[in-house]
Image (cartoon, grey):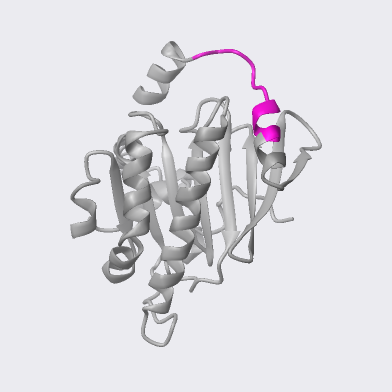
Amino acid sequence: MLHSLKRWIGGSRTGPDPRALQAWARQRGFNVKKVRSGEGLVIEGRSFDLPWRMEWGAPQRAYLLDRELRLRMELGLPPSLQMLVTSRALAEELEQAAYALFTQDMQTQIDSGMPEEMRWLAMFPKIQLAAMKPLKARFSAIASAAPPLARWLEGELATRLEEAGSDWLAQDEPLVLMTLRGRLYLRMEAMQPDAALLDGVLALFEAAARSAQAAAEAAPGHGGWPASGNTAWQSQSGYSEE
């Protein structure tokens, strides 16, 4: 992809160094573990009495070039609450790739190999939201339904996204925030994450978690969002169950 190629040409090719990430985690009292094979770390912590898991290692998505930083948290959200925020450059890349597959009628690859974020960008309609106006130059947002997405992007999450776009998130850097199967996920490229980036990522993730819970609670009957038609695609998240 074009932006990935630009990062590969212009970016640093030094090897990954986990020491800054280890120091950041230990200073904050988080549990740190090395992966059994390969280069990478697993960090476990808690936010508002809920556990989260951070993984740093080889990318699990083709649109991430070097090392991937990913977080997940079980929030007990309704399974049909499917919402996605991505950096705008990444959304455009994924939409173009999905369109190419659809127009070439590559149905097998579409069904089995395309990640949810790519499917959703091709499948869900664009939604115009007031909260997205100050963010639309840097981010894109879609969902299976407009009301929860509007609630998710209110207040704190919108503020944290603005801060990310003007601080630790580079212009072309891929970022994904999504709710899937009751969980919140974050993915981004991070070859050498430092304390400032990690603090910013965690603050964004926590804001997204709180706002997602509020969006779920705002539904009629606490979980009455309509089911979408892509539940059969939800087995491709890329996160191992442990």
Q: Is residue 101 visible?
A: no
Q: Is residue 73 above or below residue 104?
A: below
Q: Position of residue 44 (x, y in %)?
A: 69, 50
Residue drawn at point x = 57 percent, y = 38 percent: 69
Q: Is residue 66 above or below residue 60?
A: above
Q: Is residue 40 above or below residue 121?
A: above
44 left or right of 189? right
Give the quarter of the image for residue 50.
bottom right
Q: Position of residue 193 (x, y in %)?
A: 56, 30
Residue drawn at point x = 45 percent, y = 49 percent: 204
Q: Position of residue 190 (x, y in %)?
A: 53, 30
Q: Position of residue 4 (x, y in %)?
A: 42, 24
Q: Which residues are magenta?
A: 12-23
Residue drawn at point x = 63 percent, y = 32 percent: 58
Residue drawn at point x = 58 percent, y = 29 percent: 67
73 left or right of 114? right
Extreme residue toward the right, this view: 36
Q: Is residue 194 visible?
A: yes
